Amino acid sequence: MSIGGGCYPLATMATASLRLTVGRPRRGPIGTIAETLRSIYQRRRLLMYLTVARVRQDGGNSILGNFWLILDPAIQLAIYYFLVGVVLNRPQANFPLFLFAAILPWRWFTMALSSATESVRGHDKVMRQIAFPQIVLPLSAVAASTTSFFFGLIPLFSLYLVYPDRLTSWVLALPLVIGVQVLWTLPFAIMFSALNVFLRDISSLVRHGLRLGFYVSPALFSFEKIQGLLAPYPPAHLLLDLNPMAWILNAYRDLLYEGRSADWGALLVVALASIPFSLLSIYLFRRLAPSFVKVL
């Protein structure tokens, strides 16, 4: 049986605990969430396999193969540098590093949500033949995009060869910001993947929403500059302050470009807010999962 472009032993899947039901869960919300988390842990090998298969598939049909994991973010940096730094003539000091420090994590966020939204619908044939926890599909999409993000750090850290004065010990705190972004991405990925089964317009709305979010987040410009521009417009300024990705991108730029501490208080709020949101998305996914095969 082929899943994600490769072969996974059916015996491994068939011998998993039958306590995981593919029907509508009979337990309450807490029991349903706990059972789902337990099933994800039990199928961790499947999750890892799907992640590796998705990463290989992304580069398997090209001449350069998985080298695109490094080349693609570098090309994207060059495009935005030309548009903003050359055409608009609005560069800051060490502008490539300033730009890449925020564009790379936003690219990761975009890839994760886009691929996760289509993950369940893209495996409809598999779900008709094998019983497995479908929630591993959006999780593997997020994990694969995270792998691409780590490869993208190679060209980013290469910029320190050009701007060595920007490299400080605050770079060591990068995993904390990465962890917060993972926490904030997961509930959206899980929720959108389930809703897209029933409403195909969700994928288009996500794509356009991410495009709009890019321009209202401090990706091309500094957080302080956007705050100044929005100061005369309190509603818009409030939207910026309530945008978790704005604080996450600003944290990346603080650590990687400014060489200073991030706003850990704001990141803590984002992380804590992500936990109940994640639990709710897991519960909703599990409640909707029994209808996936019928709709697909």
Image: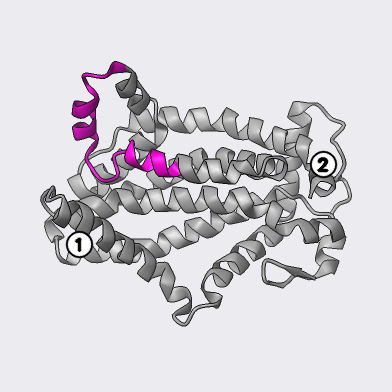
Q: Which residue is mark 1?
A: 160
Q: Which residue is mark 2?
A: 291
Residue 61 or 263: which is nearer the viewer? Answer: 61
Tell me what residue is drawn at x 33 percent, y 40 percent: 215
Is residue 280 rendered to the left or right of residue 240? Answer: right
Instruction: Tell me if mark 1 has few (under 14), some (14-19) or many (20+) residues whose alpha carbon lies within 10 angstroms of its own.
Output: some
Q: Disc 2 or disc 1, which is closer to the eye?
A: 2
Q: Does dot 2 land on a helix, a strand or a loop?
A: helix
Q: Where's residue 82, x and y in %?
A: 20, 59
Instruction: Tell me if mark 2 has few (under 14), some (14-19) or many (20+) residues whose alpha carbon lies within 10 angstroms of its own.
Output: some
Tell me what residue is drawn at x 64 percent, y 34 percent: 281
Tell me what residue is drawn at x 85 percent, y 52 percent: 17
Q: Magenta: predominant secondary structure element?
A: helix
- Which range is magenta? 210-234
Tell me what residue is drawn at x 46 percent, y 49 percent: 110
Confirm whether the magenta stretch covers residue 4.
Answer: no
Q: CA distance from mark 2 to mark 1?
A: 50 Å
Is residue 295 rendered to the left or right of residue 105? Answer: right
